[in-house]
Structures are given as structure tokens and as C-alpha cells.
Image (cartoon, rainbow, N blue to C red):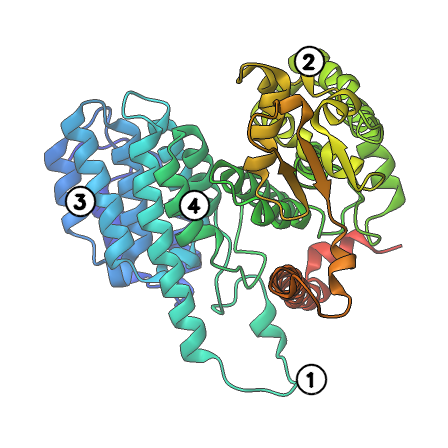
């Protein structure tokens, strides 16, 4: 085999075989070799790399196999060489023992870095994302299996510290590969991949911070949830997106992170799109950090203030004026969602003051004519009627008789609270509406309960985290 100095694959494999995970030699001989490792090859050599990979027992010396795979990814140039490297990655996902990967987490970081570099090449982000979804999905399954196998019923006050430690083999932990999987998914811009990542990665609840060596855990935690929320928006899972972005603010920190600023801006836009309201951060978030966030999102706050009025004109102009900033912040697509959802909120707001109103009056009050959707029908009034029908909201109904022009049609608003009176005519409609509210409330309660459970686990972990303790001394 080609060599550079004393670095050879034979030496790496023999050292790994003599220094298995869990033995003193692992940290005294193998880890130093891996930390200082330089590839012995100047270019991709199929025979050398193939022989090196074949010498490794994945169940016993998986960390060595990961490093050889990283070398293959970094050296591969042709499609055939890439196929060989990707086959090695897939073998890691199918055969590597989880304990091997966790014993040397820097190996996972190097693998993530190598895959990021490959994603920027002619191979493209799609293929890298597909490989990462496979790898991370199988890692999660192993973590869940380990948790289910080792978990035993315990009382409320019998949680052992070692089970909450960041490197404990208990539950799903965050790794660099999880973060890179989400990043490559976003760069791939494929809805089918968004769905796969949602099912195999995002919806698998993390049980702890993660096991990260190079990046601070807090940064990785925030970065993961920022990307996760962006994936959720891509498949219109807006409730999930809100939950992911709120978790960016769940960890205590001395300083406000740029990641938190990015999440704050996105949350403000999402709140406007879904509820037409200005975002309010959780009360546990420090006032100092809140002021920093506000100072870095002044134009976003101004846009939110525009929604307090009863017309869309000012808000539409503000979004147009902000286009440059929104594009720089990579929030233009989210702003487009705000524009699309904007009429719904202004229409509902008019319903707070009117029981019924003509379409012409509603269009005038809300200034619907300035909205881009106003041009998709023969006139703005017809477009407004179409929009209200597409809202599919029982509390906003258009009544347009035969031969009646769209502008003369009547919009009836029904207060949801008024449907909860005595049973009489229209009972079926009342029950349907009440059921819808009951289901909505039940779903919200369940989401809050899930978030509470998650934050409780996080609290327990933080209490034992050296990073948390050092950040709050003095």
C-alpha cells in the first residue's frame, strides 16, 4: 500500500484490532492515531481502499472503517469512485455497531464533513441526502432499540445520572450526521426527500442533547432545530415547524446566537402566516436576549405591526420593500406564504365587527385589490369570492344567488361562540362546529403535553451538564 510517513491502513486496522472499544488501549493508542490521521494516498486507489475496507470488522473496529470511508469520499472524483465510497457509507448504516460510532464521535463529524463536500460536487445534494437519510434512519432505529432494551420502570425520583449523561447509550442522541442530513435535504429541494426526512429523522424525538465533540452541544441543538423547521415548512407541516423553531430557544446561554436570530425571524413570519399576529416568545426567555433579537429584527417587527391594521395595503407594501432583506435572510419563500395567507386574517378580522357585509364592502375595507390573488379572476370581487370559498371556513360564508354579481354577493360571518347555545334548528351544523373546536383543543393540549415532557427531560439533563453549570456560575 502507498504510505505517507507511518500512516498506513495496515497500521490503522491492526491498531484498531488491538485497541477495541472499551479497553484502555482504545484511548491510549487508537484515538491518538485517528486524531492525527492523514490519508496515505495521494489519489483514489480502488484496490488499496477496497482491501483496507475488507480488512475491517465493522462490529469490532467500526471507527477504523469510518476513517477509511472518509478518505474514500475525499479522494473520489469519478462516478465509479463515488459509487465505491457511497457503498462503504451504506455498509456503515447497515452493519456498523452503534457503540463503535459513538465511541469516537469525531469520526461521525469527519464523515459529515466529507459528505458535505461531496454534496457540493457534481454528485449533488440529492444523492448525498438519500444516503444520509438511510444512515441516520438506521442509527435512530439502533438507538431506539438500545433504549427499549435497557429501559426499566422506575419511580419519579430514581433517574440515575449516568442515564442522562450526553454520552449515555440511552435513547436517540443528536449527531453531526443528523444535522448534515437536514442541511443536504434543504439543499436538495425535493419534496419527497423532505417527507422521508420528516418521517425518519424529525419525528423521531431526541432523548438527550447528543454526543458531539467538535461543536458545542448548544449550537448543534439550535442548528438542528432551525433546519428541521425549514424542512417542515417545505411540506406545509407548519405546526411542526413552529415547535422546532421554538426549541431553538429552549437552552440557556450567555449570549444570543445568530441561529436564534434566524429562527426568531422565521417564527415571526410563520406566526403572521398562520395566525396574523405578532410573535411572543416564551416567558422563560431572558429579557436581555429578547431585546437583542428585537434589535436584529426591526423590519420584521414593523411588518407584524402592520397586521394590526384592518387593511392589506400597508402590509403588502412593507413586504415588497423588504424583499431584498428577506432574500438575504433566505426567508422570501416564507414571506410568500405570509402573502398567500394574509387575506384570511384580514377577512376574519372584519368578521369581529360585522355579522354580514357585501363583497364589494369587504374588498374595500381589506384592500383586497392590492393583493396578487386579486388578478386571478375577471375582477377583484370575483377573486375575493373564490378566495373565501377556498378558505373552507364555516364561519365565513359567501351567499350569491343566481344572476347576482360577485360584488353584490353577501359574506356572512358567524361567531363560533354563538353556535354553542341551546339546541334548535341547525343542530347538526352546531355540533359539527363544536366537534371541530374540541378536536383542535385536544390536539393543542397534546402538543403542549409532548413539549412539556420533552423539556422536562431536557431540564434533567441540563442539571447534570457541565456546560450548563459553567454557564451559570457566579
Residue 138 at x, y percent in the picture: 33, 57
Would you call the spot at circle 1 few (<14 residues within 10 Å), some (14-19), or many (20 or more)? Answer: few
Q: Which mark is residue 454?
A: none
Q: Which mark is residue 52?
A: 3
289 left or right of 468 in image: right
Q: Earlier in the sequence, mark 2 or mark 4?
A: 4
Q: Nearer the viewer, mark 1 or mark 3?
A: 1
Would you call the spot at circle 3 few (<14 residues within 10 Å), some (14-19), or many (20 or more)? Answer: many
Front position in the image: 381 or 120: 381
Q: Quadrant of the C terminus?
A: bottom right
Q: Earlier in the sequence, mark 2 or mark 3?
A: 3
Gap between marks 2 and 3, in whole Å? 57 Å
Q: Which residue is mark 1?
A: 157
Relative to 319, is 33 above or below? below
Q: Secondary structure at mark 3?
A: helix
260 left or right of 104 in image: right
Q: Earlier in the sequence, mark 1 or mark 3?
A: 3
Q: Which residue is mark 2?
A: 320
Q: Earlier in the sequence, mark 1 or mark 4?
A: 1
Q: Earlier in the sequence, mark 4 or mark 3?
A: 3
Q: Are marks 2 and 3 in contact (CB under 8 Å)?
A: no
Q: Are marks 1 and 3 in contact (CB under 8 Å)?
A: no
Amino acid at each position: 500500500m502507498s504510505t505517507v510517513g507511518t500512516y498506513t491502513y495496515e497500521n490503522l486496522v491492526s491498531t484498531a484490532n488491538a485497541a477495541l472499544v472499551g479497553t484502555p488501549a482504545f484511548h491510549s493508542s487508537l484515538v491518538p492515531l485517528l486524531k492525527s490521521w492523514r490519508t496515505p494516498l495521494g489519489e483514489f486507489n480502488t484496490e488499496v481502499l477496497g482491501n483496507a475496507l475488507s480488512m475491517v470488522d465493522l462490529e469490532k473496529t467500526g471507527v477504523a472503517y469510518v476513517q477509511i470511508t472518509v478518505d474514500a469520499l475525499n479522494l473520489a472524483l469519478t462516478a465509479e469512485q463515488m459509487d465505491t465510497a457511497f457503498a462503504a457509507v451504506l455498509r456503515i448504516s447497515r452493519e456498523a455497531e452503534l457503540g463503535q460510532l459513538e465511541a469516537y464521535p469525531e469520526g461521525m463529524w469527519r464523515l459529515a464533513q466529507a459528505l458535505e463536500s461531496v454534496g457540493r460536487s457534481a454528485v449533488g445534494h440529492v444523492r448525498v441526502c438519500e444516503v444520509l437519510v438511510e444512515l441516520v434512519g438506521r442509527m435512530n432505529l439502533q438507538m431506539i432499540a438500545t433504549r427499549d432494551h435497557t429501559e426499566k420502570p422506575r419511580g419519579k425520583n430514581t433517574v440515575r445520572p449516568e442515564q442522562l449523561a450526553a454520552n449515555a447509550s440511552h435513547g436517540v442522541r443528536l449527531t453531526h450526521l443528523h444535522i448534515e442530513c437536514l442541511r443536504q435535504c434543504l439543499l436538495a429541494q425535493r419534496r419527497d426527500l423532505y417527507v422521508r426526512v420528516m418521517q425518519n429523522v424529525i419525528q423521531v424525538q431526541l432523548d438527550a442533547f447528543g454526543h458531539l465533540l467538535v461543536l458545542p452541544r448548544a449550537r448543534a441543538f439550535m442548528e438542528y432545530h432551525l433546519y428541521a423547521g425549514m424542512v417542515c415548512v417545505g411540506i406545509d407541516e407548519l405546526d411542526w415547524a413552529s415547535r422546532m423553531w421554538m426549541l431553538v430557544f429552549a437552552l440557556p446561554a450567555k449570549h444570543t446566537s445568530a441561529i436564534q436570530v434566524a429562527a426568531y425571524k422565521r417564527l415571526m413570519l410563520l406566526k403572521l402566516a398562520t395566525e396574523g399576529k405578532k410573535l411572543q416568545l416564551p416567558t422563560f426567555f431572558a429579557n436581555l436576549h429578547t431585546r437583542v433579537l428585537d434589535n436584529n429584527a426591526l423590519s420584521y417587527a414593523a411588518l407584524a405591526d402592520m397586521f394590526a391594521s384592518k387593511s392589506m395595503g400597508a402590509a403588502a407594501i412593507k413586504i415588497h420593500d423588504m424583499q431584498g432583506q428577506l432574500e438575504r435572510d433566505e426567508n422570501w419563500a416564507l414571506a410568500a406564504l405570509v402573502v398567500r395567507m394574509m387575506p384570511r386574517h384580514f377577512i376574519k378580522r372584519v368578521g369581529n365587527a360585522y355579522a354580514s357585509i357585501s363583497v364589494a364592502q369587504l374588498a374595500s375595507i381589506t384592500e383586497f385589490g392590492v393583493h396578487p390573488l386579486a388578478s386571478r379572476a375577471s375582477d377583484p370581487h370575483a377573486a375575493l369570492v373564490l378566495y373565501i370559498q377556498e378558505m373552507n371556513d364555516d364561519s365565513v360564508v359567501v351567499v350569491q344567488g343566481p344572476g347576482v354579481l360577485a360584488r353584490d354577493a353577501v359574506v356572512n360571518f358567524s361567531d363560533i361562540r354563538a353556535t354553542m347555545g341551546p339546541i334548535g334548528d341547525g343542530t347538526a351544523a352546531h355540533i359539527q362546529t363544536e366537534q371541530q373546536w374540541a378536536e383542535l383543543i385536544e390536539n393543542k393540549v397534546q402538543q403542549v403535553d409532548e413539549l412539556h415532557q420533552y423539556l422536562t427531560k431536557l431540564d434533567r439533563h441540563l442539571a447534570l451538564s457541565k456546560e450548563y453549570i459553567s454557564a451559570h456560575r457566579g
